[in-house]
Image (cartoon, grey):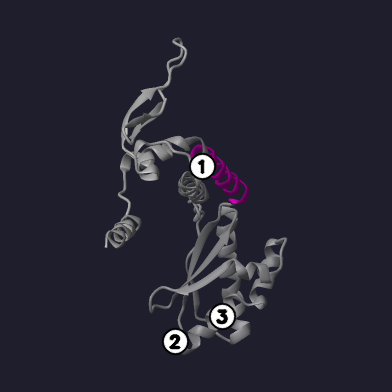
Amino acid sequence: MSSLQELDDKQVMEHKPKEINIRELFLVLKRYMWIILLITAVSTSAGTYYSLSSYSPLFQSTARIIINADSSLMSTLKVIIQDTTVLDKVVKKLNLPYSPEVLSGKIMVANIGDSQVVTITITDADSKQAAILANSVAETYKEEIPSIMGFNDVKLLSQAKEVPFPINEDKNKPIIFGFVGGIVVSIGIAFLLDSLNNSVRKEHEIEELLGLPVLGTVPKMKKTNMKEKKKHRLKFKYGGETIGS
């Protein structure tokens, strides 16, 4: 009966959840602080390098035209704005160093609500060039659409103007991700290394390991001219005898 009771007690001890000790967590972080700082610095530096090497500001400029057509014809007329028939004229007019297909990739055409106002938005690495392209596409479209579709009711509503503010201003995202990711990964590594460390550092670890009560600690003597934290040696009592140095 006693053996069964001891077995039950042992199983209870084994399955007893460990209490979270905030002080011990802090000490683990402090013990591996150099790893946390090193990994965070490396990941932040990598994010900074990536941001500086890959970042290219992009600018947008928009011209507006009015197409006086019903909804069924409007879709066709909008598609032609990005067609090479129109854009080839723009490339030749401005002597652009790329093809009409490349220019088409810079253009975004949209309606403003359900109105007949159509926006022609250009995205480019040069803010002034974006405005020039938007205005040239709108003007060339107005000139060419009568011969393409026999449609004459296109008016220029407003010209595109240079907008000197990039649309992708948030170039610090890689740096922030590198910093936060470095902290998370380094803290995880710190707790992993601590869990793999089998050395005994606390009195309660001795008691759990040997099942012996700790009577006290004896400070480790060092040179008098050194001011460091004192390390402790453990003493415990077993069978009426004191064990430890």
Alpha carbons under labels 3 and 1: distance apart: 50 Å
Q: Which residue is mark 1?
A: 40
Q: Which residue is mark 3?
A: 79
Residue 70 in the image: x percent, y percent? 44, 87
Nearest the eye: 73 or 60: 60
Nearest the eye: 192 or 121: 192
Secondary structure type for disc 2: helix
Residue 139 in the image: x percent, y percent? 57, 69
Quadrant of residue 3 within the rendered picture: bottom left
Secondary structure type for disc 1: helix
Nearest the eye: 178 or 220: 220
**Within the magenta stretch, is there residue 234?**
no
What amino acid is labelled 2 in the image? Ser
Alpha carbons under labels 2 and 3: distance apart: 13 Å
Does 76 appear above or below 106? Answer: below
The reply to whether dot 3 and dot 1 touch (C-beta < 8 Å) is no
Q: Residues within 10 Å of mark 2 (few under 14, many from 20)?
A: few
